[in-house]
Amino acid sequence: EAGVTQFPSHSVIEKGQTVTLRCDPISGHDNLYWYRRVMGKEIKFLLHFVKESKQDESGMPNNRFLAERTGGTYSTLKVQPAELEDSGVYFCASSQPGEGPTDTQYFGPGTRLTVL
Amino acid sequence: AQSVTQLGSHVSVSEGALVLLRCNYSSSVPPYLFWYVQYPNQGLQLLLKYTSAATLVKGINGFEAEFKKSETSFHLTKPSAHMSDAAEYFCAVSDTPGYSTLTFGKGTMLLVSP
């Protein structure tokens, strides 16, 4: 079974440009999460989808970030316009409810975003 | 609000030595606790999780962790380190039943020398 995949693995853009990150969850997983790790800091939650609906987007930094999950399958995270402080590694994770009292999230390898 | 503190950004051990990675948490409700590992160029992989069953949790690759409520700790141990254990380890906490929005510690890089 394929794991969580993310594309691209690396992206280098200039300040003010737009970047779109993509996450393909494990097939059949209803829950999809986005996290971000800024260099030297902890991994922080951005948002959570249940199927195509945003369950919790309390971690989104500002309105330059837009996440979508059309059809409840893959998700995209767009940053427009990108700022220097957006640099970091963006992780996607997916899970399926019903595994027990809490789900187990399976993480992708991450997209390393560098904004120059 | 919940938080996680991992003591030591880097821990160095010799091959065959005990591995001890420390994690302390704060949570206003009984927590769910996780340890993840990240090998170079890979995603985070779950080592083990505590969900209020047994306080001593056994995970993959010989790792285990003990939940101590009185100390608000969930330290990760392995009796004998292997070179292949060199990686970054993350402790995380969630207080949400059903699904787990994770709050992570800053991570601890484990270095294993021959």
Image (cartoon, rainbow, N blue to C red):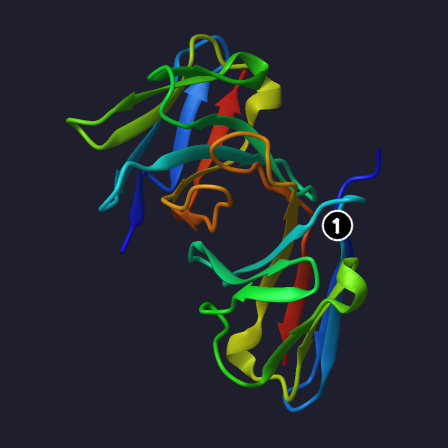
Residue toward you, A100 or B72? A100
Under mark 1, the amino acid is Pro
Identified at 51% across, 45% down, the residue is: B99
Most extreme residue toward the front is: A98
Horizontal side of B70 relative to B62 (left or right) equals left
Residue A71 x %, y %: 80, 64
| Camera-side residue of A72 and B11 | A72
Q: A38 or B46, which lies in front?
A: B46
Q: Does any portion of residue A10 appear in the rendered image? A: yes
Q: Position of residue A115 (x, y in %)?
A: 63, 78
Label 1: chain letter: A
Image x and y of residue A7, in percent: 79, 60
The residue at the point 25 percent across, 45 percent down is B27
Q: Is residue B94 above or below residue B66?
A: below
Residue depicted at 73% across the width and 67% down the height? A69
Locate the N terminus of chain A by quadrant: top right
Quadrant assignment for the C terminus of chain A: bottom right
Asked whether residue A8 is in view, the answer is no
Q: Residues within 10 Å of mark 1 (few under 14, many from 20)?
A: many
Label 1 sits on residue: A25
Q: Quadrant of the rendered structure where residue A64 is?
A: bottom right
Mark 1, secondary structure of its residue? loop
Q: Is A58 placed left or right of A115 in the picture?
A: left
Q: Locate residue A38 relative to residue A29 in the image: left or right.
A: left
Instruction: Identify whether B55 is placed above or below B47.
Output: above
State the residue lying farthest toward the left: B70
